[in-house]
Amino acid sequence: MRIRVAIGALVLALAGLLVAQDDGPSAWELYEEGRAAEKAGNVAEAYLLYMEAAAMDPRNKTYWFRGQAVQSKALMQAKVKPNPSDVSAALPPDDTPPPQVDQATLRDEMDVRKLLPPPDLTVTDAQTRDFDLDGDSQKLWEQMA
């Protein structure tokens, strides 16, 4: 009797889980709806469906790649424009004078174009040296230094 009750409770619990999981479309169904919306020309809707499918099943990269493929078209179709009040809030007030920068003189321009001399390399002792180097590039530079 106890075994029948335990098995019955287990079956009821599994049925409850299956019913609870069936509360909306699966990721594959959302992807298919997105494909249909894209074929119908509703790219913005297709993008949203692809991204929702990608969020439901993040291991399936097809959903995410398809959403990225239509993202720019979706933005163009949605015609998203910035709010003018947001743009004007980011700009400085009109009465703020621009920062003052001194005008470059001819002398400044000539100084910029003048080449600097090469660095002066002086040898401490005047003897010539032969190097017998062996190794990778890192060791060669270290040995030379």
Image: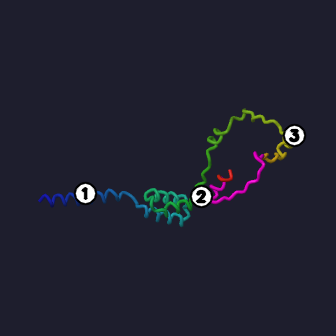
Image disc number at residue 143: none
- Per the model, the C-alpha gap separating discs 1 and 3 is 87 Å
Amino acid beneath label 1: Ala
Q: Are marks 1 and 2 in contact (CB under 8 Å)?
A: no
Tell me what residue is drawn at x 20 percent, y 57 percent: 9
Image quadrant where one finds the N terminus: bottom left
Q: Secondary structure at mark 3?
A: helix
Image disc number at residue 107: 3
Of mark 1 and mark 2, the one earlier in the sequence is: 1
> What residue range appears in magenta?
122-141
Q: Nearer the viewer, residue 37 or 51?
A: 51
Say which residue label 2 marks: 72
Q: Residues within 10 Å of mark 3 (few under 14, many from 20)?
A: few
Amino acid beneath label 2: Ser
Say which residue label 1 marks: 13
Of mark 3 and mark 2, the one earlier in the sequence is: 2
Is 51 located above or below residue 81 in the figure? below
**Which circle, 3 or 2, is nearer the viewer?**
3
- Residue 58 location, x and y as percent? 45, 58
